Amino acid sequence: MKARILTAIAVIAVCALPVVLGGFLLEMLALVILLGGCLEWMHTQGRFNKSNWILPLVCFVLTCLTRFIPQNYLYPYLVLCIVFFWGLNVFSESVSLSYGFMMILFFVIFSLIYRSIGYIQENHLYLITIVFATYGSDTGAWFFGRRYGKHKMNPRISPKKSWEGFVGGVISGFVIGWIPVFFYLHQVNLTLTFLLCLLCPAVAEFGDLCFSAIKRHYQIKDFSNLLPGHGGILDRVDSLLMNILLFGILYTTFFR
């Protein structure tokens, strides 16, 4: 428990300024999460050795570049990258087909996440709301699930999650998500903020289940042991990443 608390304090200390200030610091934090997430994602396929570090790094670089490719060239770029990962097994017997498919999954999902980070950079204050709504939901779901949880939500993937915890998490996430908004009330679109506070808690629970399904499939408890008591980077930001995708959808479709 002590290690878990100390790790949580350290993570908050490192992430607080980038989230609050945005800009270059947020960009650097996003790249660190992206790189660590890529290594953890591919670690599900087995332990790394000196000969296979290069492929996750290539996947990371190609994923980052997706955000900066001009719109006219984006489609061919995406197709070429996907075909590249898909065809690795054809040219190298040491790269399994499942390894290539996991790289495709990472490339597609995290390219969209990184593009959404670009949209957030246009007004990083929305990220503060997303963070509070996401982790407010996590905290509320844990408390209400532990106290009142009786009806299992999805025991096949996450045996401890309950519907009572889900409802409690949605309510607490909505309320907590509004707390920082009063400090920048006139700098954000209130309709978008309301939708984020309303939807992020539910999407956070879904995101956690999606990442848990990967761990359940590969029979691992955590994506890594980088953060003592918390698992890996992806274990800490799984719900947040899904909500960043949600922001990208809402912002580009209705508010840009």
Image (cartoon, grey):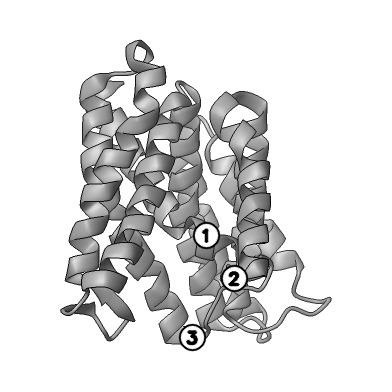
Label 3 is placed on what type of residue? Tyr
In contact (CB < 8 Å): disc 1 and disc 3: no
Question: Any mark on residue 231, and which?
Answer: 2
Neighbor class of circle 2 (other Cα within 10 Å; few <14, some 14-19, many 20+) is some
CA distance separating discs 3 and 2: 15 Å
Identify the element where label 3 is drawn: helix
Query: If the image is split into quadrants, where does the N terminus sit?
Result: bottom right
- Kindly identify the residue that appears in the image at 68 percent across and 58 percent down: 58
Identify the element where label 2 is drawn: loop
Upstream in sequence: badge 1 or badge 3 = 3
Residue 18 picture quarter: top right
Label 1: which residue? 236
In contact (CB < 8 Å): disc 1 and disc 2: yes
Residue 108 picture quarter: bottom left
Task: Relative to 88, say whether 8 is above or below.
Answer: above
CA distance separating discs 1 and 3: 18 Å
Q: Position of residue 184 (x, y in %)?
A: 40, 17
Identify the element where label 1 is drawn: helix
- Kindly identify the residue that appears in the image at 40 percent across and 74 percent down: 212
Question: Any mark on residue 218, and which?
Answer: 3
- Kindly identify the residue that appears in the image at 50 percent across and 31 percent down: 118
